[in-house]
Every structure is written in C-alpha cells, then in structure tokens.
Image: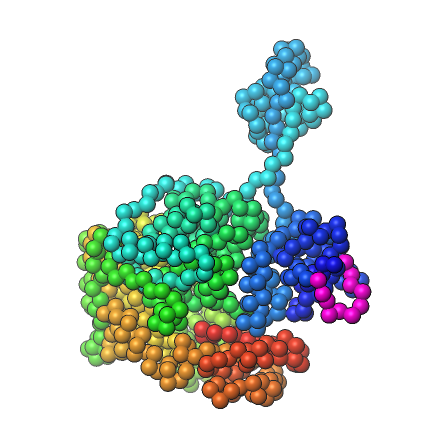
Amino acid sequence: MKIAKVIIDLSLDKGFDYYIPDNLSSQVHVGSQVNVPFGRSMRHGYVLAIGTHTSYNKVLKSIASLCEKHTKIPEPLVKLGEWMADYYCCSQEQAVRTLLPRAVRSGKVKHKTLKLYSITDSAETEKFIIEHGEKKPSQGQIAILRTLLIHQQVSQDQLLAEAGVTASPLKTLLSKKLVTMEEVVVRRNPYDSARIMASEPQEPTAEQQAALEQIYEKLNQPEKGHTILLHGVTSSGKTEVYLQAIAKAMKMGRDSIVLVPEISLTPQTVRRFRARFGDMISVLHSRLTEGERFDEWTRVSEGKVQIAVGARSALFAPFRNLGLIIVDEEHENSYKQGEAPRYHARDVAVVRAHFEKCVVILGSATPSFESYANTINGKYSLIEMNKRIDDRLLPTMKVVDMRLGSQETGKASIFSKILVDAVYDRLYKGEQTILFLNRRGFARQMLCEQCGYVAECPNCSIPYTYHKKRETLTCHLCGDVIKAHLTCPACKSPEIRYSGIGTEKIESMARAVFKDARIIRMDSDTMHSAASYETALDSFRRGEIDILIGTQMIAKGLHFPKVTLVGIINADQSMYIPDFRAPERTFQLLTQVAGRAGRGDISGEVLIQTFNPSNDTIRYATHNDYKTFYEDDMEVRKMLSYPPEGHLITIHFRGEDQNAACACAYDFFERIRPACHPEVIVTEPEPAPIERIKKKWRYMIMFRGPRLKYLRQKIRHEVLHGKRPKDIDIYVDVDAISLM
C-alpha cells in the first residue's frame, strides 16, 4: 500500500496522509499536484513524500485524482522547500507557494491557443475554384481558398482580413472538408518585439581564462555542489565569464539559472544573454503578466529552454538537470525576500546547488561580508579579477571636503566648485556625467523656524518628504500624500523651510547651473515601469543626454563608454543609519557607482563630496581597498558577534495598540528564553528603530551568536503553533540584513 503525504494550501503547516489508489499508483510522484477530499470539500494539494506507513489511526481517504492540468514540482525543489520552511521559520505551505508562480499554482491560467487554417488538398481546391469561381454565391468561399493557396497556414483573423469576408463561408468550407483547422499553443513572449543582434564569445583576458578554467574544473566534478565567489572589479568582464560558463554547461547537457538583483536590470541582461544564446532563454520575474509567467515557467518545466534569467523567484525555475546558478551582484539587499518565507536568494542558491550537485557563481565587485568570510574559512572557492578589460584604468577617485565651501560662504552648498568645473569640462568635450544621490524627493523634511514643528506622517514615525514638482508631502513608507504646507500647521507662521536634499532638488540645481545641458533624472518618482527605465537608458546610450541624475537605480549594471565623470553627493549620509551594516553598504554603494566611470577608451574620474573626509569607509572606498575595509570592520563585528561572525535572528511584533504589541513581545520572549544557551547574545524586546509604520507600533527581539539551530526551531514552533493575540502580527527574520 502506497501512502502520500499531501500538503493542502491552508497554512496549517502540516501534511496529511492519503492512500494512493492502484489506478494512480504509477502516476503519483513526489511533487505531483493532486485533488484530495478534505473535510466536506475537494482541495488541491502537492505530494511531499511517498511511503508505506502512516501514524494516522483511522481509515485513510484516497487521492481522488491528479489535477487536470497538474503541475509537477521537481523532487529536489520539494526538498528545498522543506529546508526553507524549517530554516526560515515559515509554514510548509508558504514554502511550497514560493516554489511556484501564482499563475501556475492557481490552475486558472491556461495556454494561449491560436486557430490556424489550411487547405485540405491543393488539387481539390483548384478544381473547386475553377468550377465555382464565376458563381456569385461562392465568391466568399473562393476568396478564402485563393488566400489559403498563397499561405500554407494562416490564422483566422489574417485569413478573413485578406479575403475580405465574414466567418460564415469559412464554416461552410470546414463542413465540406475543403479546409482544415488546427489549434496550436502560442507562447506569450515578453520580449517578442525586441530585435537582438547575435554576439560571439570574446577572447578571454588572462584573468578571465584563469577564472573559466577553475569554473570548468568544478563543472566537471558533478559528485558534489561547489560555490565560487567571483570577486572582480567593476568592468573586469564578469558577464563574459558568466556567458562562457553557461555555454560550457550547455555543451555538457546541463541547465543554468542567472539571477539579477533588480527587475529593472532584467531587460538589458536578457538582451545580452539572448544575443549569445537566442531563444534558449526563459525570463522569470514579477513584472510579467500572469500569462507570460505561466508560459515561461512551462517552457522550463517542459525542457524547451536551458537558461532561466530573472530576479529572486527565477531561482526556483523547475529544471531537472541543473548545472550552474549565477548570482550577479550577490551583495545586493534585494535578494532578500520581504515576506514569509524571508529567504535570501543567494543563500538558497547555495543550498539548491548542494541538493542538485551543481556549481554556484556569486559575482560582485564588493562581496557581502558573509560570502567573503566563507572563502576565508574554506566553504567557498575564491576567484579574483583585479584588472579591467583591455587594461583600462580604474577611475581616479578624489574626496571633496564640503566643510571648506561651507566655511567660505557661511552655508552648505550642493555642488562644490571642483564638481561644477569638472561637469563643464565634460560638457565641452562631449562626454557624459552621472550625478548620484541615494535619496529621492526635493527635501528631506519641512521645518518651522518659529516653533520647531516638523511635518511627520501620522501613520509612521518619520517626517514627510517634500516633492516640489507636485507640491506634496509624501511618506516613503506608507505612501500617504498631503498638499505641501504654505504656513506652519502648528503656529501659522510663514517661516517654514524645507531642509535636506533629494534627487529632485539636485535636478533643479543642475538645470540652473548647467543651463544648456541635456539632463534626465532616474528614480522611482520618474521611472514608473521597466519600459520607462529602458527608454531613458537608451536615450543616454545614444548620447542624447549629457547629465544623468539618480539614486541607486543607476549605481550598478550600467555600461556607458562615454561616461567619464561621476559625482557623488553627500557620500556619507548612509553612514549614520542605526544598523551595523551601514559601513558595508556605504562602501558597496560608493564602489558600485564609481564603477560607472571610465568604462570606454577615456579614463574616468569620480568626485566624492563629503562633510567627513577622514571617515575610514570613504577612505577605503577611494582606494578600492576591499580587503583592508573588510578586516577593519570585522574587528567590530567579532567583538559584538554580528554576522558573519555569528548568526542573527530578529523577531518582530506589530499592532495598532502599542501596549498590546509590547506585552506580546515580552510574553513571547519569556517562552523562548529557556532555549538560549550561554553564547547567545539577546536583545530583549524594545521598540524598532522606526517605531511605527502604517499605523502599527513595532517591537523587536534580537538574537545573535553561534549555534542557533535549537533556538530557531523553538522560535518556529512558537510562531506557527503557539498562542498569540489575534490583533498582533509576529514574524521572524532569520539572517536579517536590516535592523530597521
């Protein structure tokens, strides 16, 4: 007797045993989607395991059937989902939902079909036209047949349009069997209209060749999984290494997954990979339509492609013979999922590679501390590429002390004289400039100089951001928008000012200073879709823009040979966020945006404006000295047992009643405390750095240290199965990347 453990999509975190009837015995496998009786209803479920015993002491119900258009999750992915549920403290149902796009999981999206018509027999058709061609009642039929003689096969819309008739004579011809109809599945291709020029593999540089030889060596060892950190400076040719590694995997008959950190970067990545591999690529990300996602996932599942490219969720592409996973810009925070399961795609990629015995390449110019530490302790292999391709020099980086300008004028300026002169020099030479500030909006806050009132969001514990073009105050956490104040709401004084700067203000000032320059701003206020992002970049690529202003959206992945100057405004502003990773993120951001300069034949220059020029992080970034920066910052982390020295788990409590949220946090903490061993460092319940978001008060508990497995299991049980107030949300973040 075969028994299947089936997970039902009800968030019960529990599998149920069902008897597999003899007529389905050969069809039901691990990962199969089945219909099962549950209570008084029939529900869909997925088979997690198959065995011969059950602990259920009553008569088992039987699986009713396989789902009509059932989707099958490959068995290694089922195993990966079970690991994710355990490690990231989420329910098994949440993990399974992550493995499948909603379009596939729901069963509601179907294949798009197209009716194609053709003539049954050419000789019979010609005979019919000769016999009936002059008879008026047959003119509509004759027009259709003549059209079909021209086309071997044609859709109904095209056929009727060219013949100039209605569908009625077509039905007559079908009934006479002079015309046949075939219904075919049509792919909804998100990049169908894009014209791609094929590219050939480039001759590797010495460093690229050395990197490829190490990767090929690992690919030829399929008995276990391998993880490689590819640490290459910006413009060192990491993408070409990826492309040639994928080509090698394809020759071996193995499939590849390529992850990119931002959906906005996906189109340009797809363009480069399609140029090399044509239609052997499937694209998977959240901005596709439901139909497109269904079709792309199905192409992978049916073995019609060998490469999947996309953001986080592309990691779960259902390949059966996976050979290579590439995580580009592996240090990026966007690889961390914001909802349960709060997985990190980089880390799950390593686990999937372990299960499926394949190779993972983690690529970055500024690796995460976690990945770099794993090369030091021997868990990962390290490949370094320290030279730019074609022996291009790294850009020269200069620190501009903004305190000097403030002392001369008595007020802080936005553009230093050095930066202004440098931009004018590029305008004169016909070269391009990028101005970077990682804050959108016009001003950070509205302040009354009479009474000190600050306009804050009533739903969140942060000030509103001022957007001048729309004359609004906006909360960037909950999205609340109000009209900008003309006078102080508290004391009615007109003496209000908007302090701090954002990209909108940078754009306004740039247009005033560089009057004849062609300027564009790229941030989430101006780029509302992937299409608008691509349009702006194409314009910049063609040289129609002189100055590009933007946030971290423009800091990575962009290759524009005519950009010879990058100006970084307020380089140290991200240093003062209350988070132990603030220096690491600042170093990464400065290095990444600086890497946009000098990627062509002309050397590049980077000007870093700061009020704290002696800051160690800025100093290390200026000298492109990742190793020393890592060693220096790790000293602090080792003392405090922060990652990667120890593990980090945060538990968050949210509720509209502040006292109830606080009480829930303390009650939960008391139940968890016995699971803490002496090496665990515990931060007892306290308000989160941002106390309130979207009307909910936030409290958090933090655990860090080595060997947290038993503690994690206890936390998982309490979160999923323990008692809690109904009006309090509790969620766990394992390996948290932010304390905000």
Q: Nearer the viewer, residue 236 or 52?
A: 52
Q: Quadrant of residue 636?
A: bottom left
Q: Is residue 529 visible?
A: no
Q: Quadrant of residue 45?
A: bottom right
Image position, residue 31 (x, y; %): 62, 57
- Relative placement, left or right, of 450 versus 136 is left
At a point 65% along the width and 24% down the height, the residue shown is 179
> Main structural element of the magenta stretch: helix, strand or loop?
loop
Q: Is residue 231 visible?
A: yes
Is 245 drawn above or below residue 312 in the view shown? above
Image position, residue 662 (x, y; %): 58, 86
Q: Is residue 58 magenta?
A: yes
Q: Nearer the viewer, residue 668 or 445?
A: 668
Q: Nearer the viewer, residue 207 or 232?
A: 207
Indicate the colouring scheme: rainbow
Is 305 drawn above or below residue 170 in the view shown? below
Q: Quadrant of the N terminus?
A: bottom right
Image position, residue 543 (x, y; %): 29, 49
Range of residues picked out in magenta: 52-62
- Relative placement, left or right, of 520 versus 349 is left
At a point 52% along the width and 83% down the height, the residue shown is 701
Image position, residue 246 (x, y; %): 40, 50
Q: Is residue 100 magenta?
A: no
At a point 69% along the width and 50% down the height, the residue shown is 26
- Relative placement, left or right, of 14 versus 712 is right
At a point 65% along the width and 80% down the height, the residue shown is 722
